Amino acid sequence: MRVLGTAGHVDHGKSTLVRALTGIDPDRLREEQERQMTIDLGFAWMTLPGGEEVGIVDVPGHRDFIENMLAGVTGIDAALLVVAADEGVMPQTREHLAILDLLEVPRGVVCLTKIDLVDDPSWLALVSDEVRELLAPTRLASAPLIPVSAVRGDGLDDLRAALAGALKEAPLRADLGKPRLPIDRAFTIAGFGTVVTGTLSDGSLAAGQEVTILPDAHRARIRSLQTHKARVERAVPGSRTAANLVGVEVRDLERGDVLTLPETYPSTRVLDVRFRLLPEPSAPLRHNQEVKLFLASAQRLARVRVLGMDEVPPGAEAWLQLVIDRPIVAARDDRFILRRPSPGATLGGGRVVDASPARLHRRMNRAALEALSRRAQGSPGEILVQAIQALGPGPLRAAVERAGLGDEAAAEAIAELEGGGRLILLGQGGGEARADTIVVTREAWQDLTRRLRDVLGAYHAANPLRSGMPREELKSRLRMHPRAFAAAVETASREGLVFDRGARLALPEHQMLLSPAQNARVEALRSRFRASPSTPPSVKECLEEVGEEVWAHLVESGEFVLLTAEVVFERSEYEAMVGKIREALADGATITVAEVRDRFNTSRKFALALMEHLDATGVTVREGDFRKLGRAAPEGGGGA
Ligand code: GDP
């Protein structure tokens, strides 16, 4: 599941656009509707052309409410930057874009809206150029630019397609088994009690779970969960999630608190971070300067300790230690923004390198700085995991390349990950990882098998008479590379998670339900076998009687034993014959095909097929025209 976030100057048409795309009014506060201005975060959702549902966080564009905007944009998968065509780039267009870039939001779409207000095409071209120029030095440099009129509806389909295209490239959120929900709203619903909402990350939540809300460590239980106003038993990473809680009052909660499982995250008052000061604030960032810290939905006052230099010059990067007024929940690699408290201005941003440093570092200590720099890069294993997460299931070679690891570091990384069980090698039942081995992280594998089984389960529910889902259909539903898909199916089948029927795949627990008509035909077939057990109908006749799918099902169920492409016996008859042959061959006796034919009162064709089958399964051994008991000779027949 994914989330989009809007961005752009006040009155440029963000909320109107969200309404036009989703039919939902994101301005939910009465004051917002009266003033026709977004003050706080708004939420909506829609289904994109590919069928995927996405959440939308609509943020306020007015400079007075930029701090509310910050609570909404961390955790989004893609940005929808809105620029009014009649006005062009304005101050909060720039500020929002700078924030998206500092937060490293990797992709987005730019919407040039209100084109109905512009008659002059050269003006539109001018504004487009201005926007392109603004985007050029940012991560959104290659974002598509879509002209739209939200009131007339022009361009909305193009916009939806562009959003779907941008999100298609976004990797699915990893399930690290460590869910955290940074709370952006907490409220009461009469008769329900406390509800909190946020964008879930790093793990799933399930109804019934005991949770804790940090930093005050309030205990609660999840009574129910919703995503996009629909009840779900399980909320997955990357989804807009509302949790109805038992055992905690709204007055004890606030925006910025984090709902998580007990003993999963510590809260901290000190963070080690890598920080970039924007070039615009002409003043340097001083040691001990007071700043406002924005991380996920939280906002705190903090004091800056500048490490390794006296102060941070505009445009420069630096190591900082942030000493925060009140504990916060953070993890390595979390993005954050720092602002000057008053007059308010965005200073810069960066990422967390150590979420719970052991101590305050001495400011000019070289060893501490080197340790931070190593930590920022991560161990070879961590770097490789990040690369694999970003790429999804694929050949090891591609992940090593993306991670930029040399041979030695790559070997070290693989050993580290395999040892910890964090890396799954797909499509090979053991053995060394090779360059072309398809690899996934354990979390991604759990996620993938869950999706695989969900899709199969839905298929079985919709097609109870089918033995399974066509392999190709499943592959395209999962949108996987063919080799990665084949390897994943092989491993899932070995782990007993799916049943591989060749052209079709099924859940192992799937029981095919025959229709009354099919049942009648199966009964007719059974009586034909009973009528002449030792000269039964051919496979071709069986297929004509019951159809391919039911026939495959009957063979799989073991009711019929295929000896060759043409010859088949009912299992009980087959087993009786094998028993008799074994008896006849006791004490080193031999038998010929002609004798078998006569003994069972059948034809040479059936007798030959039976004996060749028994040779192949090791029940008998052929010596010229004779057969004797083979070494394998398992009890109860060789099976098919
Ligand atoms: P926001 O502050 O960015 O959320 O902007 P709003 O969505 O509240 O829109 C600001 C004003 O622009 C409202 O009066 C809208 O009716 C108007 N508006 C929004 N989109 C369009 C559009 O495509 N064409 C025209 N003519 N007006 C628009």
Image: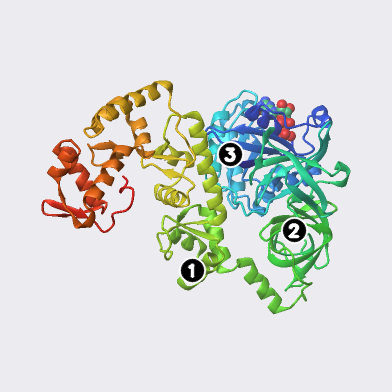
User: Tag 1: residue type?
Assistant: Ala
Q: Where does the N terminus fall, quadrant-wise?
A: top right
Residue toward you, 573 or 341: 573
Q: How many marks?
A: 3
- Residue 278 seen in this snapshot: no
**Percent position (x, y) of residue 564?**
23, 41
Left or right: residue 31 versus residue 237 is right
Mark 3 highlights which residue? 128
User: Tag 2: residue type?
Assistant: Glu
- Residue 205 seen in this snapshot: yes
**Percent position (x, y) of residue 622?**
16, 54
Q: Residue at x 42, y 66 (%)?
A: 432
Q: Are marks 2 and 1 in contact (CB under 8 Å)?
A: no
Name, please, the residue furthest toward the front.
Answer: 587
**Element on which disc 2 rests:** loop
Mark 3 vs mark 1: give the one in front: 1
Query: How many angstroms separate mark 2 from mark 3 (CA)?
Result: 50 Å
Query: How many angstroms separate mark 2 from mark 1 (CA)?
Result: 32 Å
Earlier in the chain: of badge 2 and badge 1, it is 2
Mark 2 highlights which residue? 263
**Element on which disc 1 rests:** helix
**Percent position (x, y) of residue 134?**
62, 47
